[in-house]
Amino acid sequence: MTAAVKSTGRAVVVAEAPGYVSVASEIQARVFERCFEYLAAPVRRVTGFDTPYAPPKFEHWYLPDVDRVLDAIDTLHWDEDA
């Protein structure tokens, strides 16, 4: 994980769990601790919403989807390197 972050300077953490006090927040913290000097953009988190988990009928609104992940990637300022 750290090798990829060090080579690109960017990271997006995706998890189905809520983002607050979660595995995703711990991974984000560890990336900041281990790769801070290599980061060209903030580490982004794409997670479920900070609400109780949705019933099965509505989980497609709760879980991270492709659009939310791509929106997070767009905020990583890729064009600044050009």
Image (cartoon, rainbow, N blue to C red):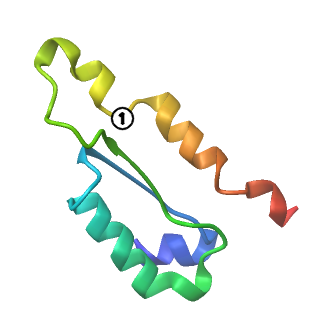
- Quadrant, the C terminus: bottom right
The x and y percentages for residue 4 are 51, 70
In the image as oriented, which residue stretches furthest toward the top?
A: 57
Element assignment for label 1: loop
Residue 30 location, quadrant? bottom left
Q: Is residue 75 left or right of residue 28?
A: right
In the image as oriented, which residue stretches furthest toward the front?
A: 51
Residue behind mark 1: 64
Alpha-carbon neighbours of circle 1 within 10 Å: few (<14), some, or many (≥20)?
some
Residue 7 location, quadrant? bottom right
The x and y percentages for residue 60 are 29, 20
Identify the residue shown where x is 29% and y is 39%: 48
Residue 37's place in the image compared with 23, above or below, is below
- Quadrant, the N terminus: bottom left
In the image as oriented, which residue stretches furthest toward the right?
A: 82
Residue 54 location, quadrant? top left
Q: Is residue 39 left or right of residue 79?
A: left
The x and y percentages for residue 47 are 33, 45
Q: In this orientation, which residue lies closer to the viewer: 1 or 61?
A: 61
Kindly identify the amino acid type of the residue bearing the numbered disc 1: Pro
Residue 59's place in the image compared with 78, above or below, is above
Identify the residue shown where x is 22% and y is 22%: 59
Identify the residue shown where x is 48% and y is 77%: 3
The x and y percentages for residue 64 are 36, 35
Identify the residue shown where x is 63% and y is 67%: 41
